[in-house]
Amino acid sequence: MPTDQGRTQILNRLKSVDGHLRGVIKMVDEDAYCMDVIKQLQAVQGAIGRVNALLLQDHLQSCVTTAIRGEEAGERERVIGELLALFEQGAVRRPDEPDRGVTEAGERV
């Protein structure tokens, strides 16, 4: 779990994303110009990417660091495996890279 400071940052960013997304919904509802909507959605994606980066940073500095410094080899392997799986699934991607979705099997496309 994130630190108190990290949690506050993450929640603030998510609330900002929520407000921005509500604005995009309103734009679509009011038939705004498609390119304007796309630009706003790209901004939302970028903001979500920054939230992901904050969460990953906190995870690396707390959970992963603790596991690597710990005595349990199984725990070290588990956290490293989680990171590799996340990377392989494409869950950690550049903020400018489009999200193509997830199949029913949970695989990214």
Image (tube, grey):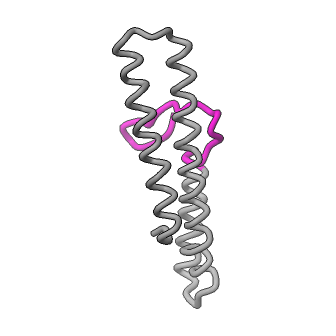
Quarter of the image containing the N terminus?
Answer: bottom left
What range of the chain is rendered magenta? Answer: 88-109
Q: Position of residue 19 (x, y in %)?
A: 41, 37
Q: Nearer the viewer, residue 70 or 73?
A: 70
Quarter of the figure with residue 80: bottom right
Quarter of the figure with residue 63: bottom right
Q: Is residue 94 left or right of residue 85?
A: right
Q: Position of residue 56 (x, y in %)?
A: 58, 59
Give the answer, above or below, for where 25 lies relative to 97: above
Q: Is residue 103 left or right of residue 13?
A: left
Q: Nearer the viewer, residue 61 or 24?
A: 24
- Let me know if residue 20 is in the magenta part: no
Q: How many marks?
A: 0
Q: Nearer the viewer, residue 53 or 104?
A: 53
Q: Residue at x 47, y 61 (%)?
A: 8
Q: Residue at x 37, y 24 (%)?
A: 25
Q: Position of residue 75 (x, y in %)?
A: 52, 79
Q: Main secondary structure of the magenta part?
A: loop
- Let me know if residue 104 is in the magenta part: yes
Give the answer, above or below, for where 47 lies relative to 27: below
Q: Outermost residue, bottom direction? A: 71
